[in-house]
Image (tube, coloured by chain):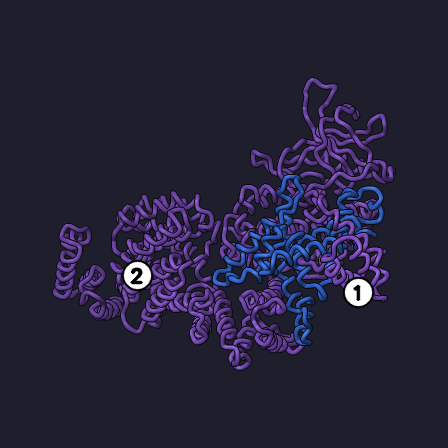
Amino acid sequence: MSLEGEDLAALARLLDEALDLPAGAAREAWLAGLSPIHTHLRQVLRGLLARHDARGGDDSFNTLPKFQPLSAETPASGLQPEFVAGEVIGPYRLIREIGRGGMSVVWLAMRTDEQLKRSVALKLPLVALNRGRLESHFARERDILSALTHPQIARLYDAGISAEGQPYLAMEFIEGTPLIEHCDRLRLDFGARLELFEQVLRAVQYAHSHLVVHRDLKPSNILVTAQHHLALLDFGIAKLLSDGNAKETALTVFGGRALTPDYASPEQIAGEALGTPSDIYSLGVILYELVTGVRPYRLKHNSRGALEEAILDVDPVVPSRMISAMSARLRSSSQRQLSRALRGDLDTIVLKALAKRPEDRYPTADALLQDLERYSRGEPIQARSAGSWYRARKFLARNKLAVGLVAALFVALVSGAGVALWEAHAARLEARRAESVKKFLVGVFSQSDPEHARGKNITAGEILERGAARLDHDLRDEPEVLGELHGAIADIYTSLGSNIDGLAHAERAITLLEKTGRQRSPEYLNALWQRAQALEEEEKWADSAPAWEQLRRAAHRVAARDGEWDAIALRGLAWGATQQGRLEDARQLYGQAMDIALRVAGERSVLYLQTLGSSIQADLDLGLLPQAEAAARKLISMSPSVPGYVLTDRLVTRYQLAVIAFRQRKYQESIDVLERLLPEMDEHIGPRHDRTIKARGLLAQELAEVGNFDRALAEEQANLESARSDSSGDAEQLALQELTFAKILKGAGRFEQGIPHARKGVAYFDDKYATPTFLRERGRWILGDLLVGAGRVDEGIETLERTLQNQRALGGGGQSAAAADVLMSLGRAYRIKGDASLASRNIEAACRMYDAILGPGSEPAVRCHAGP
Amino acid sequence: MGELTQLLQALRAGEKDALGRLFTLTYNQLRDIAHQRLRNSQGDGSLNTTALVHECYLRFTRIGSLSLEDRTHFMGYAGRVMRSVVIDFARERLSQRRGAGALFVTLATDIPGEESASAERLLRIDSVLQQLAESEPRLVQVVELKYFAGLTLEEISQFLGIAPRTVQRDWDRARLLLLAALDT
């Protein structure tokens, strides 16, 4: 019998009663007395109870069944011809089976009749199935493959048919790991993966140029040997393009079904004519998986049908949105870092390769290769033509909504209130409370009905905004839940980078959680942390310090995690102190934070290393170069053994080492560090990353310093372009690079060219800071010098006099090395103008100031006394 | 997108399980890990769901502050996820065979017979649990945690805050019910 629905439920209930009864008369009586609607279950019950009595050795449901891993194409039924080791096929003796696909078996084999004992991979097509078709297929493969000789393509040595009628192909034996497995096993980072992929592209381009389409490109057909040699296998269903026939033969249709659809192109699924674009598509899927760890389509059901449907009709999810923490770790990166690296250009490249229409894809493997190389060099890619860019943006917008929505809901649900809501029956919270949260969520999402937004996408941010606006009204009777939800929303906002909104919600959360006596809850500590963090990001130092203090106090009340929170809060306080110029305080606070981090997490912990890393900046700012250097070297030697310590942080530390050398005027040493570091930065975090731009700017300055103006200008020119092309980039960073460029141009004597760059930098800082700051005035000094150099002496003097005035408003009452620099420039300018007395007065003042600040023996002082 | 739209509509209509279904959207990640695990299991073939539960737990606590203090809720969720992962896995196995095209069904079945029997059995178990979801939610949860997540009865009793005797009783009943339902 087959038990269904009501019977199952009834049986469950009846078993509950019966299991209490001892076997024997009592049970029989109970069975006899079953209600008439249950009598048909009597037999089943009797049998089950008997089994229960004897249950001693019953372990029927103790463990899950085992499965063979999917990727190894598993041995099939006995219907296929079986080969055994030692068997001879043609001139080959079989050694062991090394692979099996839908259409053939591959054995490691050795030639029997030759002196040269070369082992080969012997591919044996399964002739049991439709011999005629396979033979023509086989013959074709032989002809095509023998024409291909490329280091990255497995060679065909020999082909024939044995006396027994078994066709065989003797191919180069490649002992390797499938591409993606290889990358994951070695935790290859993103850049190393791209390099391997570029090798694949070159091989495919070679085959395409020989009019061969692979048609079954997939990671398991791309092996990497222990010597890191990459090889493409199995041009099993390749077809000579030269016959030029668009019509497909029965053979290819047949072949099409044998494919793994995961990497098949839409036209392959649809059974249409195949050309090189079909391989491009498969390469797109491989690239997608290589960088994200997943395939491009999320399926409702894992069936072949659903996959085929998706390949034909569904737009792939943008790769940068598919990075999980796990896949980032396999790429020696962090989730945020990796998705930042992919966002934009790489997304566009992958999506172009995956375009549904063959004519929308890259026309050749080489075109794809070139775009990837452009991407690696930080140049604009070709895929960004109007049409494809529009499509890419469309994908992004659409998926942002979906992904963002789920993220938002997920956060709300995972926080206590949400889970309680989800499993209201098990919740300790009263149903009333769950109900009110639910109503709220339903309300929010009914507003996001896509129907109401025809023609325009609603962003997750907008939904969040509307939801947040309704929160206080809808949940006014549930302050506790309300507090938690405000906290969750603060989380989302800060992770989206909206610090101001995050701050507002964190504050609401804090108030509400305090009101409801939840000061010891993790939600409360988190809200405090969110607030302090947001204030810090907004550079509101006066407010962030008390916020960190409050977090410390609150954490002390909760025993479990106080140490960790304490270290984090102290670190925050220290950072604030650095930013306000209270460097001694900062150093002390970092010391405390490190002690605590050592105590609660140990030396080999992310907490400790991060704290150590941030302390280097304070040392640097304090001019404690030996201390900073010692800390940086310690960090660099320890961090590789601490999982979770992100690569970006390590790169930054190396950058700091370069800064230390720079400060010690060891320019060549610093240049050496940077020359090694920058390629890695370009590769891992990209040339447009804030840190990379800073590092390249420093390199350019130092090259100028050692007199290599040509390279300095080239580096800074490239850097400036990177800074400009990052539309979401930091405007201050851009302004700084404009000034750096201007300064190098000044050194190179190209004054006229430098002026517009200096003006841009100065305009930015004038706009940003109402009162003089070091950078603002440093920029004006460079501008003044450039004007004088370009012969616009009066304008230059005016600019320099103005900055001299402003210098007085800075710390030290205008007594600083920077002010001395300005005086020096003024002296030179007046001399050019022909005003000897003003010239010498300024130069004398400059020399006195250098003496007082840097010491009479210092290089600028000596130079000053030697005369301009 | 379609799925999400449906869910939103369901939410609006006040459908009870819409939120639960929303969770399924987050299962993908865990499913990927499970598959990765299996691929790396070097032929052992066991889906180590117990380790996955721990991984899943770490993931949530790593979201930061959202650490699920309440172990009851977390474990309830983890059991559901593991069941989904295992069932999807079984489904995938079967669809591989069924989907391989008529020509190959008889010839090159990609999975051995034993495996497809296991997979079908798992789907049957899942169907039984679905039918009991409403009348016996606790029993279903015990099966999820015991069978799919691989926890011990003692652990389940602690996590769910249910007396050990009750957990044992639920497990006994579940086992008998499954035996009856699979014995066809």
In the shown orientation, is residue A47 left or right of residue A528? right
In the shown orientation, is residue A124 left or right of residue A397? right
Which kind of residue does numbered mark 1 sit on? Glu
Q: Which mark is residue A578?
A: 2
Q: Earlier in the sequence, mark 2 or mark 1?
A: 1
User: Residue A75 falls in which quadrant of the image?
Assistant: top right
Mark 1 and mark 2 in contact (Cβ < 8 Å)? no
Marks 2 and 1, Cα distance to the nearest angstrom?
70 Å
User: Residue A641 falls in which quadrant of the image?
Assistant: top left
Give the chain letter at badge 2: A
Dot 2 lies on which element?
Answer: helix
Q: Which residue is mark 1?
A: A6
Q: Would you call the spot at circle 2 few (<14 residues within 10 Å), some (14-19), or many (20 or more)?
A: many
The front one of A185 and A766 is A185
The front one of A595 and A826 is A595
Q: Quadrant of the C terminus of chain A?
A: bottom left
In the shown orientation, is residue A796 left or right of residue B67? left
Dot 1 lies on which element?
Answer: helix
Q: Residue at x 79, y 53 (%)?
A: A24
Q: Position of residue A435 (x, y in %)?
A: 60, 75
Query: Please, which residue is most extreme toward the top here?
Result: A115
The front one of A84 and B53 is B53
Q: Position of residue A609 (x, y in %)?
A: 38, 50
Give the chain letter at badge 1: A
